[in-house]
Image (cartoon, helix red, strand yellow):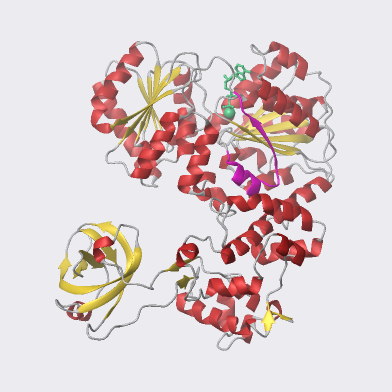
Amino acid sequence: MLSLAQLPVTDLKGVGAALEQKLQKLDIQNLQDLLFHLPSRYQDRTRVIPIGSLRPGDEGVIEGEVKGTDIAMGRRRSMVCRLQDGTGTITLRFFHFSAAQKNNLKSGVRIRCFGEVRTGASGLEIYHPEYRRVDESVISPVEESLTPIYPTTEGVNQARLRMLTEAALGYLEAGSLTELIPEPLRQQWRLPPLNDAVKYLHRPPVEADQEQLLDGLHPAQRRLAFEELLAHHLSLQKLRNRTRQQGAPLLTSTGQYCQPFLEQLPFPLTGAQQRVAAEISADLSQPYPMLRLVQGDVGSGKTVVAALAALQAVEGGFQAAVMAPTEILAEQHYINFSTWLEPLGLKVAWLAGKLKGKKRQAQLEMIADGSAQIVVGTHALFQDEVSFANLGLVVVDEQHRFGVHQRLALREKGRQDKRSPHQLIMTATPIPRTLTMSAYADLDCSVIDELPPGRTPVNTVVISDQRRAEVVQRVQDACHQGRQVYWVCTLIEESEALQCQAAEVTAEELREALSELRIGLIHGRMKPAEKAEIMASYKAAELDLLVATTVIEVGVDVPNASVMIIENPERLGLAQLHQLRGRVGRGSVESFCLLMYHAPLSQQGRERLAVMRETTDGFRIAEKDLELRGPGEVLGTRQTGMMSFKVADLQRDADLLTRVKQVAGQVAEDVELTDAIIQRWLGRDEQYATV
Ligand code: ADP
Ligand code: MG
């Protein structure tokens, strides 16, 4: 049968060169692409909902009688229309409107609307609903089946896409979509035929189980989600295989530096550190590049493990680079590495944006001529002017902050004679297993699942900001006992400027209330040098209290800091709260974290803060975060691009992943098939194709 992949969109009536171009933006070139442009969700316009039963966030059809329409002045002029149906009243609000529109919405007129309910100035409101007048004496029909909603782009709106998909569906009898999952596997996993599934999702039949469809749990959706997850998995697997085909420096461990390093450490490694170090050591002695992700909760001692890996690279005759996402962190690593390694006769170079002129030149030379065996820095390390003598290993700390692309760019940087350096990626943000299985399928994973002995878990208290005065008192008491305190300010706005301003105001207030204390302030708008100076004096205990924005989130180590106040913790993700809290509890004294929320908390907000109070286990927190917020939020915006799925949802479809992995193994041999599956779902997005 004819494959719809062979028919260009221009075969459809009304699709000319202009529309063809616009469709390109949606990655649609042929009829198959068009049919794989699936609805991202559905609207339920199949019933009229009583106004009295609406909740914020609901979306649906309502019908009622207009009880008056007025112009409201407020911050933004708007037209408000009150609508009543006998069960309740709701406000329709329009920010753009005409005089004619106002006239049409006279008292007594019946209208039917569709829109999303939100909490507005007057209670429940719908902004800019779609609406039309209805006649009470004639029953006007609602839609029979769910309405598909497509992802759109400029010049290609919903209506257009509905028409185009309708036309393409017309071809489904004569031609077909290429079934890419082999028949025996389809039988084995009971997957419905592709054509049927696609048709179903574009035009759910009247008798469809609507609840199931709206929840994304219909077998047709699961069938496609399965294939999509498979495509992602195969793409990462391909990347991994390609990596394996590249050569890498053989870094044989001799113990020359590792042994004396371990002997001079003031503590023995934990069991988990030993295990992970051994896994890394085995990778480094392979002739292909290591790509290993080490996950270890805050304070689990990843730095020592990284140092051991770096030393093995040096023993093998190569350089190691250690990269951190911020200058504060990079500098901290630089201090650690030089204190540890210079006594062993090694040279550590340092490179960051703030290093300029002659000093920079000197470091660059040491890196280029190989007199520095270890190089520590920020992403400045990977600018063009930096050239390594012989880079054997790249360690990336706090991987979370870097996206896949940066990870790959790094690898390219160290490439010489077709050999790529080994890569070790360390993250303190535990990544739930479901995510590692998909987003990180190209990496091997190690987990440092044990904290060094002698740590006392942080006591977490959830407290309302109405008790702020008590909290300030507590801070004072703690400082008088010689403890150091962090006070973290957050803001709901994305604006960094506002967040910094809030921190400035808070610092001022605290300076007034606690005039005898030495109070510092650090935020993201300060120059790196200023920040470093403040951090250094806090670390040297020249400050009692540090007011900060979330810039201190990652990695900073001040063991004497044992109390942290977090304002408005309800605004942050759990993983971020966990990171912040990890800044205290690093010494042996009992530590406290006060989560000072602003009432009232939503149900979800309460649940989330309760998780923080109940556990300090980063993995449990990450799982909960994923459950409550979804993968985009958990991985951070940098990586969401890569995690955007058309049909699949990592949380909802997590149970498919084991099967996906099995099927991936079963089809991996067939290169043509594998490429076709990847192409269909990732298309031009296949980020890895060029590596
Ligand atoms: P993270 O995993 O958060 O990067 P670090 O490597 O900064 O943790 O280690 C946190 C602290 O624990 C450091 O002060 C480090 O010296 C110390 N540490 C690391 N390993 C051990 C160990 N095995 N026993 C005791 N202390 C350790
Ligand atoms: Mg660290």
Say above or below: 655 vs 556.
Answer: below
Q: How many marks?
A: 0
- Residue 505, given in percent of the width and then of the height, sits at 29, 33
- Image height of 640 relative to 32, above or below: above
**Residue reaching furthest to the bottom:** 13
Look at the image and say whether residue 419 sits in the magenta stretch.
no
In this picture, residue 292 sits left or right of residue 121: right
Horizontal placement of 480 versus 444: left or right? left
Q: Nearer the viewer, residue 155 or 501?
A: 155
Residue 434, magenta (yes or no)? yes
| Image: 605 above or below 508 | below
Residue 372 visible to the viewer: no
**Rendered residue at 70%/62% (across/down):** 678
x%, y% of residue 182?
A: 76, 65
- Left or right position of 372 against 595: right
Where is residue 80, by image quadrant? bottom left
Per the rendered image, the range of residues in magenta is 431-450
The x and y percentages for residue 225 are 60, 60
Residue 486 visible here = yes
Ligand 1 rendered quadrant: top right
At a point 66% along the width and 45% down the height, the residue shown is 407
Position of residue 156 measured from the top left corner of the image (x, y, whole percent): 50, 76
Which quadrant of the rendered structure holds the N terminus?
A: bottom right
